[in-house]
Image (cartoon, rainbow, N blue to C red):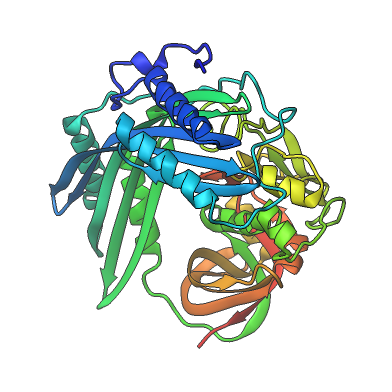
Amino acid sequence: MTAPDAPPTCAAPASYLLHDEIALADIARDALDHARSLGADDAMAVVAENGGMTTRASNGRIESAYRDGNHSLAITVYDRQRTGRASTQALDRAAVRRTVEQAVAIAREVQPDEDAGLADPDWISRAPPRVPLFAPSGLGAEDLSRDARAIEGAVMAAAGEDRVRVVDAGVSSHDNRWARAASNGFCDVGSASIHHRWCVTIAEREQAMVRDYWSTSGRRTSDLLAPEAVGAEALKRSVARLGGREMGTSKVPVILDARIASGLLGEFCGALSGASQYQGQTFLPAPLEKQAMAAHLTLSENPFEPFGLGSAGCDSEGVTAKVRNVVEAGIVKGMFLGALAARKLGLRSTGNADGPTNLTLKSALTTADRDLPSLWRQMDRGLWITEFIGGGVNPVTGAYSKAASGFWIEGGEPRYPVIDFTVASDLTRMLRGIVAVGADVHREGRFRTGSILIDEMQVAGR
C-alpha cells in the first residue's frame, strides 16, 4: 500500500505533530500485512496522532499552560463474518503486531454477523477528495497565554456594578493527522486543525449567583471571534440572567436560542442514524419520503466545505458522502448510513459511518433581516430559552422533557430572566411545529442553525 498523492501539509513547521502522513500510512500498512498473515479475511487499520497546546487564565494570572499529544492505532479484522477490534497507544512494530493479534483472537471468539465487513468495493472512493482542513496556528505558550488574558481582561474591564468572576478563560490550538487503510484497497491520509477560545463567568448580585459562558471554535484561527469578544459575550450573558424569577405552568410558544438549537437537530439526526433505524430505536421508523419537519424547512449536508468542522473527503470506511438535502420541504430524503447499517436495511452506504458531516437548517421564510429580536416580536409572548440544564429525550417515543433557563418575552421584548422550569413536548410535534428560523446563524460543531421558534410547548414551573 502506498499513500495517495497529497500536498506536503505534513511538513508544515508550525504544526504540533511529530509524524508525517507517510509515516502513519506505513504503520497502517504493516498492521494490514500482519492481519493477512494471521489468516484474517479482511482488515482496516486507522493510525492517528493529535497534538497541541492549551492555556487557561483566572484571577488575573495563567492557571495552566501545557502541551499535550497522543497517537494510536485501531485495527478491525473480519474473520468468517466475525469482527474483532483492538487498539493501542504505542506505535512501535512489536506493539502494532500484538494489537493485531488481539483483534484476530477476539474475532475468533464472537458470533458471526452476515452483514459485517468492509464497505463494498463499489462503494469506496479510490481517490478521496482532499478537503482543506489543516491550518496550524503556529502559536506558542506565550501567544496563547496572551489571548487567555485578553479574554479575562475584557470581562473585568466591563464588569460594571455587579460582581463578576471569571471561572475559566481559555485558549487551545491542536492539530491531528491520520492514515486509514483497508484490505479492500481503500487508503486515505490527511491532516486537520482545530482551535478554541472560551470563557465561563459567574455574576453576583444581592447574594444571587448565575453562571454563563461563550465559546468559539474553528479550523483556522481567523474563523474565531476575537478574544475580547468572547469575554464580552460571556459577561453580557451572565449579567443578563441576574434577577431570575420562577414561573407557573402553561403552554406557550418557545424560542430556542441559536446557541442551543443545534441540540434539536442532533436529536433528529440521531433518529435517522443507521443503528437507530435497523435496531428500531427511533421515533422515525422507515422515514424516507415522510413529512418530519415543517414544510418550509430544508436540512442540507455538505461534506466538502473547506475548513468545515464536520468536513471529510470520505468517512472512516472509505465511502464519500454527497452534497445533498437530508430534508427537503420538510420531507425526509436521506439517512446517515455506514456499511453495516446499509446492509441490514438493504440500502447503500451514504458515507456517514462517522455520523453527519456539515448540516445547515434553513427556512424558506427566513430573510436577511430575520434576526433574534424579530423572532421575539413574532412570538409576542412566550419563552426564549438560552440554556438547557438537564433532562433528556426518549429516542424511541420522541418524548422530550428538559430543565431550562431563559427569558420571559412580553410584547415582543425580553422582560426578565426565568429559572427553575422544565419544557416538555415530543420531537414529532416540535419539528413540525417550527414556525420560523432566525437569520442569527450559529455554528455548533457539525450543525448550523439560527434561533428556532416553536409554536407551543408545555412549561412547568415549581
Percent of width and height locating residue 374: 64, 53
Percent of width and height locating residue 439: 63, 44
**272 in relation to 322, above or below:** below
Which residue shows up at 28% across the image and 24% down it? 18
Q: Which of 44 and 127 is in front in this view?
A: 44
Question: For this view, does 207 lie left or right of residue 281?
Answer: left
Q: Nearer the viewer, residue 40 or 189?
A: 40
Q: Can residue 82 be seen in this view?
A: yes
Q: Which of 162 and 330 is in front in this view?
A: 330
Residue with the most extreme right position? 289
**6 in relation to 228, above or below:** above
Q: Which of 348 and 297 is in front in this view?
A: 348
**52 in relation to 266, above or below:** above
Question: For this view, does 177 lie left or right of residue 84?
Answer: left
Percent of width and height locating residue 203: 29, 65
The total number of labels drawn is 0
Percent of width and height locating residue 175: 36, 31
Which residue shows up at 71% across the image and 28% down it? 121
**350 in relation to 288, above or below:** above
Q: Can residue 316 be seen in this view?
A: no
Which residue shows up at 71% across the image and 40% down it? 300
Say which quarter of the image contains residue 211.
Answer: bottom left
